[in-house]
Amino acid sequence: MKTWTRHVALAIAVTCGIAIAAACTNKAEQQAATQGGTTALGASEDLKALMAARGLSEADVEAALKTYTPTGKKDEYLIFASGGHSGQVLVIGVPSMRQLKTIAVFTPEPWQGYGYGDESNKILAGAMQGTHALSWGDVHHPALSETGGDYDGQFLFVNDKANGRIAVIDLADFMTKQIVVDPLVGSNHGGAFVTPNTDYVIEGSQYPTPLGRDYAPLSDYQAKYRGLVMFWKFDRKKGRIVPEQSWGIELPPYSQDLSDAGKLVSDGWAFLNSFNTEMATGGTLQGKPAIESGASQNDMDYLHIIDWKKGEQLVAAGKATTMKGLRVLPLQVAADEGVLTFVGEPKSPHGCDVTPDGTAIVVAGKLDTHTTVYDFAKIKDLIANKKFESKDAFGVPVLAFKDAIRGQVEVGLGPLHTQYDDKGNAYTSLFLESKVAKWSVKDLKLLEKISVHYNIGHILAAEGDTVSPDGKYVVAMNKMSIDRFTGVGPLYPQNFQLIDISGDKMRMLYDLPIGDGEPHYAQMIRADKLHPVKMYTPAGFNPYTGGRDPNATEGGKERITRNGDQVDVYMTAVRSHFTPDQIEVNEGDTVNLHITSIEQAEDQTHGFTIDMYNVNLSLEPGKSENVTFKADMPGVYPFYCTEFCSALHLEMTGYLLVKPKGK
Amino acid sequence: MKTWTRHVALAIAVTCGIAIAAACTNKAEQQAATQGGTTALGASEDLKALMAARGLSEADVEAALKTYTPTGKKDEYLIFASGGHSGQVLVIGVPSMRQLKTIAVFTPEPWQGYGYGDESNKILAGAMQGTHALSWGDVHHPALSETGGDYDGQFLFVNDKANGRIAVIDLADFMTKQIVVDPLVGSNHGGAFVTPNTDYVIEGSQYPTPLGRDYAPLSDYQAKYRGLVMFWKFDRKKGRIVPEQSWGIELPPYSQDLSDAGKLVSDGWAFLNSFNTEMATGGTLQGKPAIESGASQNDMDYLHIIDWKKGEQLVAAGKATTMKGLRVLPLQVAADEGVLTFVGEPKSPHGCDVTPDGTAIVVAGKLDTHTTVYDFAKIKDLIANKKFESKDAFGVPVLAFKDAIRGQVEVGLGPLHTQYDDKGNAYTSLFLESKVAKWSVKDLKLLEKISVHYNIGHILAAEGDTVSPDGKYVVAMNKMSIDRFTGVGPLYPQNFQLIDISGDKMRMLYDLPIGDGEPHYAQMIRADKLHPVKMYTPAGFNPYTGGRDPNATEGGKERITRNGDQVDVYMTAVRSHFTPDQIEVNEGDTVNLHITSIEQAEDQTHGFTIDMYNVNLSLEPGKSENVTFKADMPGVYPFYCTEFCSALHLEMTGYLLVKPKGK
């Protein structure tokens, strides 16, 4: 710190002329410095008091200056973080570490009107998995769309672990456009991850079930339970996943975990790790060992090595069977044709991260103290030459661990995930040790560790999982915050810690509490790669359908039409009134409300609600929304603008009058 | 800034020994300073480059040091902000301006498991207003519980403008415990506000409807539409509002707006302002003027002066009529008995804020450039002596404006709300001018203005609406952020700006984007007044019912019982397994799941989900939850812990097996 402090002292001195002298030891110069102001001594006392009052060390001062972002100054990076079982995605600016937006994905969110209008309801209703309406999701792994292995800032994909779903978010307007269901798996986890040009979005299952979730007793676990990895085809032009063009591979009933796509030399391949190859199913009530111990018996689990290009060819050649509308390559075919190969990986692995150059795969075992670096070239040769050590119980060929690895690095207790910088270094999260370990991929040498607070899960770095990481920043995604923040009850916020990795030593910069979800993975993209629209132009655009709304209404063409008991209201919203502002219908009518914001001014959003009818929409400039409801409650119901849009916002109101039957 | 900068230069120099010399101009000393490090010149270049790269001015450096809060250091204040139509409440630390938590109130929230378990579902289901299930709310005004006019940190009350509801949040665990419905109003706005000892929570309606929302054509507006102010009785011991002990006052069909309770000398009184005393109802489709213009015709609207202690006596004396189970004092009685009195207030007022000493009420008219300061003593005398200028169309006595005011202050364009500091100053938000105006309540003199970004709505200050404001901080709650933050699509975040008011001049410190709701009002309380629990002890506590859960399960006593097609599962959760971890039921069974977290470690939260069944709970340490569902989907469904609780969190799983009929 001393060196740095000297910099500050001088630099601030330099930046303010006369002040220079004030920092000098020479008594005479100090007196000179008092001209036109507080005496230097008095001055120093003031600031020392301030620093003492705020408890700031010199390191804190540096951290403050490296993160503080003045009004109007933009952030350099955006983090897209899963919101865990909030079901949403969080957008966070770096280095300011300010939450800029929550994107509603699997959970209805009224501020955005998501799940309260006809089209957004369709997205959610179309994503059910049975008779129980799903009103949430468990978001784990966001994946930004890539071109040539680099983020291109166009789309974001996230998985719902709990209900086996993948969502597509368009970064043109930061809105969810599609939720795709996987009808075969009981849960997913290894996803969303994309291939280097976003041809496919990869989804790996987690807890095995009979594919399709049909009933089978646990005694049939090995015979009938299975895993699955799906390759969801993405149509970039349409901005949608195309299930008919997607396909999967049947896997043994191990708990497949995180996955990553090969890149550059390893493009065309995918890697999934797994745990519970013991196939433990618990039985705690019967006094049997819990899965946590049953699944921790073997020294090795299996890294799944998948030649997806070959799989794609086999599926095209008709080797897949169709299950619930999805093409699935049978396990036996995948094993026999060299699409699926295993290699041992130490005790209960979690992270699986391909290096930027694509030549290695780094895996960390939760119960191992090492990261294991697999060498793709060696793996490829072994497979090409069919040099297998054995086969697993399902006939999948297994490579010899020692022949497939480049080496191991002892990093510490509970290693989970690894990210990369621009200098050939890797950063691995240590859950049990509450540290981040920095190590050299080239030399396989541990370089440094830094403490985090506390129990770090995933870790992310600036473009740290692409072919060209930026370095600069790492974020520790800590699961526990315990004593870090002011108490807010028994449910504690998570803690994102921003770490400066631009220098030789890692430096802790900032603690960000996350008090509205439990993020798992996140990605950090350069902000200048994103080009979001500021409004919808021309007015009348429906962001859910992605085109002009057939019911879009222009100013002056507002109207109310009736066809039997169907009432269509074509409405516009503009500062500070709705047209119409009086809607009278009969009890029992079905009301189809079509609202267009004809605003074309940035940040000039309106909202629309009808009291007691649970109608609630967000009307960004130029947006069209539709909402249908049954007017089954007679009486008088105000409607009004829910976004404070102008000085006369409170006057932006009107009435729905529902005439009782027989009146 | 120069003076301040000199302080930094010296202070940092002083705090770091040798560095002092480095800041000197004397060449010889500069060389001396180079010993053991970069040359001073090189050093200064380094930092100048950093400051340039980050675009930091000297003012920014000061702001950074006044807000940056190092890891482990706590915030001095907590802000409780309404989340607008997100339906939730946001908790923010000051001065760090970090969002610490979102409290789920009117909208189901899966991370907290709120709206996914039997008891939280009961809170939401009990708060319906008809046949349409309400899955959101429009939160406007949080009110912290008070003792003697000061925040006591025990409870928080918020209103739902859209659906006429009031929620009670217990600050022991930051959870919503009760939602009370007002079956009479079409919407509310003047609430929640509390009387000085929280005897009552005040709720004023906004858009008039026939009380009870019965049908009446708009032609009957003056005859049949009405406003209402409710005084909800709060039982502090029970921590619940008691509707049977609550009562209201019928009001004319003006749009009653913000309200505030008298304090100290004005305790026993309440003040509501109003707009649209023109009773405009629009008719835009028919070419009639919109309400925004119809409601802006009169020079004066009416400040409602309510003697609620007298009202309470009259209700106790049986002068109220009962409507939908609530006691309501008729307008005529209130007018005749001196419970309700009016005084003119300039054009379309919005804010209504009693001064800390209780002697004055400050009202701002949106279309007026002044704040008007009403003198409570004068008002009280005028009423006592029945010195009325006139009566309104409904027979309510009206005081002479000039006789009731202490004076006016020209503050600027679009004044809305006012808060107070500890030095006798007031701070008024100026929506149209995008400024905060600081003025002296004693001298009625404008002192200073500061620009905000942009279009400020409400304003808040540290304990700024109590009998003893703290000064120190003001927060501008800006409705628009336009160019302040990195773009995140057409729906922009709001912008909270922290302003330092500790010195003679206001100083802008920090911009906080709010990207998950549209806050209206907020309150800032000293953090040391809050004493939240860290866990539920002993284990088995149900936070929704506020006692031990009758189905709480102890370790070792887990079991599954069956009674016909009713299956009860008594489950425990502890790192890292559930007992039982295998649940087999028959298709068609009703499953009553009772889960207790037997953890007693801080921040050791588990979650519980059953895939595809939309079952999702948050299990803080010691918490018991119950969830009931119909096992109507045969097959195999994993359940698992949704909070990353340990290194073997992923192994904390099990299976629900639903045996198909006839198998």
Image: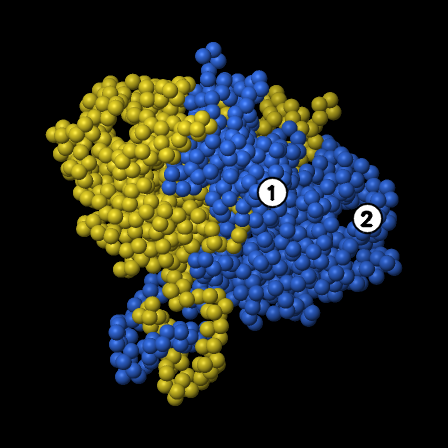
Chain colours: A yellow, B blue
Q: Is residue B8 shown to the viewer in this render?
A: yes
Residue B176, disc: 1
Q: Which residue is drawn at 44% across and 39% down?
A: B575
Q: Where is residue B124 in the image (x, y as percent from the top left)?
A: 61, 35
Would residue B426 be found to the left or right of residue A387 on screen? right
Quadrant placement of the C terminus of chain A: top right
Q: Where is residue A238 in the image (x, y as percent from the top left)?
A: 35, 32
Would residue A38 be found to the left or right of residue A188 on screen? right
Q: Is residue A557 above or below residue A318?
A: below
- Label 1, label 2: how many angstroms apart (C-alpha)? 30 Å
Mark nearer the viewer, 1 or 2: 1
Q: Which of B243 and B229 is in front in this view?
A: B243
Would residue B218 be found to the left or right of residue A73 on screen? right
Return the residue at label 2.
B311
Tell me, yes or no, whether the two marked residues, 1 and 2, touch with CB atoms within 8 Å.
no
Would residue B84 be found to the left or right of residue B365 on screen? left
Q: Which residue is drawn at 48% across and 80% down?
A: A42
Q: Identity of the amino acid at label 2?
A: Gly
Count how many numbered circles sit on residues in the image: 2
Q: Nearer the viewer, residue A406 or A68?
A: A406
Q: Is residue B291 above or below residue B343?
A: above
User: Badge 1: few (under 14), some or many (20 or more) residues near its Cα, within 10 Å?
Assistant: many
Q: Earlier in the sequence, mark 1 or mark 2?
A: 1
Q: Position of residue A384 (x, y in %)?
A: 13, 30
The furthest residue to the bottom: A28
Q: Which of A388 and B537 is in front in this view?
A: B537
User: Badge 2: few (under 14), some or many (20 or more) residues near its Cα, within 10 Å?
Assistant: many
Q: Identity of the amino acid at label 1?
A: Thr
